[in-house]
Amino acid sequence: MAIASNISKRRQSALEEGSADYLAKRAELVEIAGRQFKTHGFKATTLAEIGHKAGLDRATVYYYFGSKEELFRECLRVGVEANIAACEAIFDDEKLETRDKLRAVITQLMSAYDQYYPHMYVYIQEEMSRVTSEKSAWAQRIVAKTRTFERIVLSLISDLIRTGQMRDDIAVSVAANAVFGMLNWTHRWYQPGGTHSAAEVSNAFCEIFFSGMEKR
């Protein structure tokens, strides 16, 4: 117990000091953990494996993160918070027309999947249900941010239908789920540097969605 407490104090002190080397190693561990979580899942991934790939023993990993759960949370925080903030900025931009906002939001999410690969996909692929059912303040904050994104998309589509810019014979919720489905399913096949860029994918998705929702 005393050893664990000492490591915790050292970790907190190092975080507060924020040296470049310490933060760089934390970032490396987050990157490695994200890849491991995506490949093997949260339960099957161990701190020992993550540490080994970072050139650290399991005990040393605790100097940077207190648990596998903490590493997982950091993986999510990095991508989810940045993406939601960007989407909220798009939604609040009064210079953009509603149609352009929706296109920009779709583009932003695909860009986030690319930029924060594989952290965003870890959430979608396996752990979303686990986070959603968790009652901690952290989990509820992540869920709230996810709901914010969903509300943004629903609101934009609803406005486009209401103003006659999109067909009204398809329910808003169905149309929104088409967007979520296209974007979220990319966790099964998209990789940065692959055959198609994030921009190509988002452009294709926008073409499919807007063409399909065009008023008849």
Image (cartoon, rainbow, N blue to C red):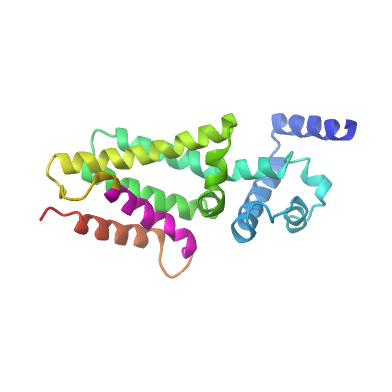
Q: Position of residue 129 (x, y in %)?
A: 53, 46
Please identify the dominant SS of the magenta region.
Answer: helix
Looking at the image, which residue is at 34% across and 57% down? 202
> Visible in this render: residue 187?
yes
| 96 and 24: which is toward the camera | 96
Looking at the image, which residue is at 46% across and 53% down? 113
| 139 and 35: which is toward the camera | 139
Q: Position of residue 179 (x, y in %)?
A: 33, 52
Instruction: Look at the image and tell me in which quarter the N terminus lies.
Output: top right
Residue 77 within the magenta-colored segment of the rendering: no
The residue range painted magenta reads 174-190
Instruction: Look at the image and tell me in which quarter the C terminus lies.
Output: bottom left
Looking at the image, which residue is at 30% across and 41% down? 154
Residue 178 within the magenta-colored segment of the rendering: yes
The vertical placement of 6 against 75, above or below, is: above
Q: In the drawing, does residue 40 fall left or right of residue 90?
A: right
Q: Quadrant of residue 145?
A: top left
Q: Position of residue 95 (x, y in %)?
A: 23, 36
| 186 and 97: which is toward the camera | 186
Total tally of numbered discs in the picture: 0
- Please, which residue is most extreme toward the right here? 2
| 65 and 159: which is toward the camera | 159
Q: In the drawing, does residue 213 fall left or right of residue 58?
A: left
